[in-house]
Image: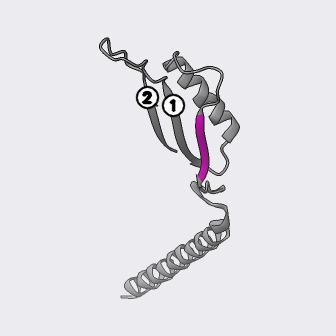
Amino acid sequence: MAAAVVLHRATRDPLAVTAPAAATFSAVIGVDDRAAPDAIRAATARLARAAVPELPGDGALAIEVHATVHRPTLAKVGPFSVEESSSTALRAACALACLAIAGLAGALAVSARRHRRGSSAQ
């Protein structure tokens, strides 16, 4: 999530002829595509009004909420968390790795058995 906030607070100048400008607030917030923009907008408005009580209460604050990031759907494959679209490929890779490990273990067992037979014949 990314946010940019511009806050202008009114300052009183005792020597100024004109009244100070009213406080203003604006925010641009970038969120992921599953966020609730209305809830974020309401929370931002509450926070702004709590932080700067002199904001005009009658007008709406300038708050823009945009979905800028796609949040992927994750799937759990064994001890791994992967994007759902690649879970089938990971399962296949894990199955191939298990087959390769079993094949290597079998080859070592046969080799050890042959080696034992050859050394006992001497």
| Colouring method of the image | one colour
Name the amino acid type tagged 1. Phe
Within the image, what quadrant is residue 77 found in? bottom right
Front residue of 115/10: it is: 10
Q: Which residues are magenta?
A: 62-67
* CB-based contact (under 8 Å), mark 2 and mark 1: yes
Residue shown at 64% from the left, 73% from the top: 92
Front residue of 88/14: it is: 14
Residue shown at 61% from the left, 44% from the top: 65
Q: Secondary structure at mark 1?
A: strand
Q: Position of residue 100 (x, y in %)?
A: 54, 77
- 89 up-or-down from 5: above or below: below
Report crowding for label 2: few under 14, some 14 to 19, many 20 or more residues within 10 A (C-alpha): some
Within the image, what quadrant is residue 10 found in? top left
In the rendered image, which quarter contains the C terminus? bottom left
Report crowding for label 1: few under 14, some 14 to 19, many 20 or more residues within 10 A (C-alpha): some
Characterize the magenta stretch by its predominant secondary structure: strand
Residue shown at 62% from the left, 20% from the top: 57
Name the amino acid type tagged 2. His
Q: Position of residue 108 (x, y in %)?
A: 47, 78
Instruction: Spot the residue most to the top.
Output: 14
Q: Position of residue 40 (x, y in %)?
A: 63, 35
Picture disc at residue 25: 1
Instruction: Spot the residue most to the front.
Output: 17
Judging by the rendered image, the residue that carries numbered circle 2 is 8
Front residue of 11/103: it is: 11
Q: Is residue 55 left or right of residue 75?
A: left
- 119 up-or-down from 33: above or below: below
Which tag, 2 or 1, sits closer to the chain's start? 2
